[in-house]
Image (cartoon, helix red, strand yellow):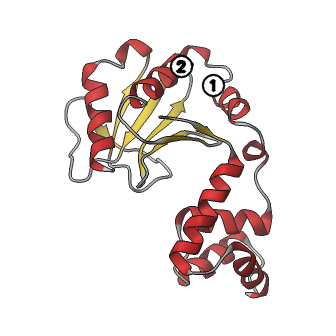
Amino acid sequence: MTTARAWQEVADWSATLLRRQTGTGVVEWNRRVLGCGEGTEVGVRRWLRERGVLGYPQLLLVMERFGRPEPLGGIASGVLAAQYSGRPELRPVLERLVAESGTFGAQHVQVRRTHVALVTPRRTYAVLRPVGRDRVDLGLRLVGQEPAGRLSAVAVSGNASLTVRIVVTSADEVDGETVDWLRRAYSENC
């Protein structure tokens, strides 16, 4: 089953990951961050990385220290409305891809300020990002898959684990081939 997650649910999940990775909870890490002597976000990120705190737990601690960007404070529907503002013709692409992915198995949808991540219980396997007014980039984590056919190289994605992308300009392009690639990414990342 697929569910949209509000920021608080993502924060709770990140806190669980932090404790699992480090054996220490958010309160203690917040104390450490405040005492680390770093006053900038870049400095705190570097300090955390040196201590093995990466990914979502790092993001959580940075936001605990410096505050959340405003769009993350809103509910998922508000963030989606902002993402697709001025490009309503692309919203059906998102809805179709999310609906198709919901048939694959256990996962959740993480709505972010600039994109929507599709996440298995193990990790992110796809990212849907509206680009301009005419397309949605479907970034996929398919390790070892070279760009060919509909699969192109990933431009700047903000997620280094994405290896290829499919450019989708309408819901009609979410066809069997696109769904097959999406399903393969899901299966490889469960």
Left or right of 145, for residue 157 = right
Helix or strand or loop: what does disc 1 sit on? Answer: loop
Is mark 1 in CB contact (under 8 Å) with mark 2? yes
- Report crowding for label 1: few under 14, some 14 to 19, many 20 or more residues within 10 A (C-alpha): some
Q: Estimate the x, y position of residue 168 in percent, counting from the top left.
A: 40, 24
- Residue 33: mark: none
Left or right of 144, for residue 24 = right
Quarter location, residue 11: bottom right
Q: Is residue 8 above or below residue 185?
A: below
Rendered residue at 74%/37% (across/down): 75
The foreground one among 178 and 148 is 178
Q: Is residue 142 above or below residue 169?
A: below
Rendered residue at 79%/81% (across/down): 34
- Report crowding for label 2: few under 14, some 14 to 19, many 20 or more residues within 10 A (C-alpha): many
Rendered residue at 43%/15% (across/down): 171
Left or right of 121, for residue 84 = right
The foreground one among 170 and 5 is 5
Quarter location, residue 149: top left
User: Which of disc 2 and disc 1 is earlier in sequence?
Assistant: 1
Left or right of 168, for residue 59 = right
Q: Estimate the x, y position of residue 182 in percent, counting from the top left.
A: 32, 34
Helix or strand or loop: what does disc 2 sit on? Answer: helix
Identified by mark 1, the residue type is Tyr
Residue position for label 2 = 90
Residue position for label 1 = 84
Quarter location, residue 18: bottom right
Q: Estimate the x, y position of residue 108 in percent, counting from the top left.
A: 51, 41
Gap between marks 1 and 2 measured at Cα: 7 Å
Identified by mark 2, the residue type is Leu
Rendered residue at 47%/47% (across/down): 157
